[in-house]
Image: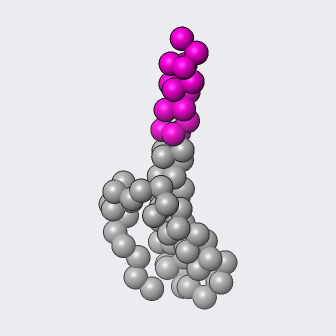
């Protein structure tokens, strides 16, 4: 299995990061990877999860700002 460079995670949109995270989790759950491959997948999954959280945090902040603006 070939995983893209971890440096590209910051370039992913929310849906791309989420979809890849699902693929990573599925592959880890299959348990057919070597230990080294599993560790690389785990690390990538952590980065992807953090990227998704960044997108969600940004969306929450935008919603809060819109609600505040609407209330004024």
Q: Which residue appears farthest toward the bottom when viewing the image?
A: 32
Q: Residue at x 50, y 18 (%)?
A: 69
Q: Main secondary structure of the magenta part?
A: helix
Can residue 25 be found in the magenta stretch? no
Coloring basis for residues: one colour
Q: Quadrant of residue 22?
A: bottom right
Q: Is residue 53 above or below residue 6?
A: above
Residue closer to the observer: 7 or 33:
7
Q: Which residue appears farthest toward the top when viewing the image?
A: 72
Quadrant in which the N terminus appears: bottom left
Report the side of 24 relative to 12 (left or right).
right
Q: Position of residue 8 (x, y in %)?
A: 33, 62
Residue closer to the observer: 59 or 27:
59
Q: Quadrant of residue 33?
A: bottom right
Q: Residue at x 54, y 20 (%)?
A: 70
Q: Residue at x 34, y 57 (%)?
A: 11
Does the rendering let one see residue 50? no
The mark total stands at 0
Can residue 66 be found in the magenta stretch? yes
Stretch of the chain drawn in magenta: 57-72
Q: Is residue 41 above or below residue 13?
A: below
Q: Quadrant of residue 72?
A: top right
Q: Residue at x 55, y 74 (%)?
A: 23
Q: Position of residue 25 (x, y in %)?
A: 61, 71
Does the rendering let one see residue 68? yes
């Amino acid at each position: 299995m070939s995983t893209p460079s971890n440096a590209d995670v910051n370039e992913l949109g929310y849906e791309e990061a989420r979809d890849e995270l699902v693929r990573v989790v599925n592959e880890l759950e299959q348990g057919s990877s070597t230990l080294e491959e599993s560790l690389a997948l785990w690390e990538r999954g952590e980065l992807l999860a953090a990227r998704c959280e960044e997108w969600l945090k940004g969306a929450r902040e935008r919603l809060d700002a819109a609600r505040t603006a609407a209330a004024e």
